[in-house]
Image: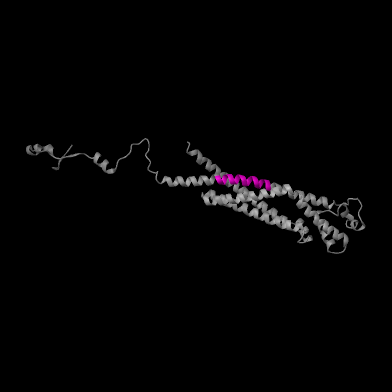
């Protein structure tokens, strides 16, 4: 009973590892989808077209995309290695999966630490880009900045921004007329959109931290189980002929044959002289006792 409990735990850990690998794979696909939408999505792309390469938003935009794709790749690779190692009971693949999970965990910790110390950095870069386009549109009402501002406002269903003095100039008031004047402030609309995106990213980050920690625990346990199982197999080659406690040890075949066969006894001199018939066997050989 004591020997079956460890192996039952290993079987349970294998099932949990397969399920965890499946969820980690889904998490990797979700992170990849979020990274692609962040870089190629309409809301982010239109702000990216309006900004220049030297703005903080553009650098942060590229950094978020590369980090998201890297994390998604490591999550997918770790899930595949963990599942394959569990099925094939390969210690090397399990160690590779553990390494992928550890790298993802370290990266997510850095992301969470950065988000904690800079909670509004992304929002500030986004709004600074909008302010830049807005100021250009106010100064040039018939050029490209005006077209860019109109495209941004149509995408976020907003128009203009409120003045701190509650008074807008003629140029600023001319940007929002008719139905556009009833739209919300663009600063409020952009903040609402970024808040939703930030909540999704924070949720995926928390799930990723929990999943990678659990996957690392399972992979390390299964790695030790695989290593101990392989050593037992190697020892098993020499312990296959162990004696059963309820049976007596068997002697070599030569001794078993000599003990189980009838004893041969040569005839004595008296038997030969008197010609006793029992002195020899039926074929005239020595008598069997």
Q: How is the image coloured?
A: one colour
Residue 184 percent location from the top left of the image: 85, 51
Left or right, residue 271 beside residue 48: left
Q: How many marks?
A: 0
Residue at image position (55%, 44%) is 221
Left or right, residue 284 beside residue 218: left
Residue at image position (42%, 45%) is 235
Reply yes or no: does residue 217 show up in magenta.
yes
**In which quadrant will I find the C terminus?**
top left
Residue 279 percent location from the top left of the image: 12, 38
Q: Which residues are magenta?
A: 205-220
Residue 171 percent location from the top left of the image: 90, 58
Left or right, residue 194 beside residue 284: right
Instruction: Please identify the dominant SS of the magenta region.
Output: helix
> Which residue occupies the extreme top position in the image?
246
Answer whether residue 154 is visible to the viewer in this image. Answer: no
Taking 90 as reference, is 12 above or below it?
above
Pick whichever, 22 or 243, lies toward us: 243
Pick whichever, 61 or 275, lies toward us: 61
> Which residue occupies the extreme bottom position in the image?
143
Residue at image position (65%, 55%) is 70
> Which residue occupies the extreme left position in the image?
273
Residue at image position (62%, 53%) is 74
Answer whether residue 255 is visible to the viewer in this image. Answer: yes
Residue 137 percent location from the top left of the image: 86, 60
Pick whichever, 217 or 142, lies toward us: 217
Reply yes or no: does residue 89 show up in magenta.
no
Left or right, residue 94 beside residue 266: right
């Amino acid at each position: 009973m004591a020997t079956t409990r460890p192996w039952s735990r290993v079987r349970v850990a294998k099932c949990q590892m397969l399920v965890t690998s499946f969820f980690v794979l889904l998490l990797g696909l979700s992170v990849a989808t979020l990274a692609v939408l962040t870089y190629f999505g309409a809301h982010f792309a239109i702000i990216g077209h309006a900004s220049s390469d030297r703005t903080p938003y553009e650098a942060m935009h590229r950094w978020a995309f590369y980090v998201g794709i890297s994390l998604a790749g490591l999550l997918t690779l770790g899930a595949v290695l963990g599942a394959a190692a569990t099925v094939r009971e390969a210690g090397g693949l399990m160690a590779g999966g553990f390494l992928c999970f550890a790298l993802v965990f370290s990266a997510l910790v850095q992301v969470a630490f950065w988000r904690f110390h800079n909670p509004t950095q992304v929002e500030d870069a986004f709004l600074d880009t909008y302010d830049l386009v807005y100021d250009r549109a106010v100064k040039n009402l018939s050029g490209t900045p005006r077209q860019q501002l109109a495209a941004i406002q149509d995408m976020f269903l907003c128009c203009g921004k409120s003045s701190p003095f509650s008074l807008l100039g003629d140029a600023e008031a001319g940007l929002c007329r008719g139905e556009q004047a009833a739209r919300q402030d663009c600063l409020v609309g952009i903040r609402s959109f970024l808040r939703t995106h930030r909540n999704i990213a924070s949720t995926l980050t928390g799930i990723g931290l929990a999943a990678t920690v659990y996957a690392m625990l399972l992979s390390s346990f299964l790695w030790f189980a695989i290593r101990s199982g392989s050593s037992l197999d190697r020892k098993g080659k020499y312990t296959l002929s162990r004696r059963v406690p309820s049976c007596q040890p068997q002697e070599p075949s030569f001794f078993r044959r000599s003990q189980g066969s009838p004893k041969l006894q040569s005839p004595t001199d008296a038997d030969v002289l008197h010609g006793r018939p029992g002195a020899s066997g039926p074929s005239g050989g020595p008598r069997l006792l």
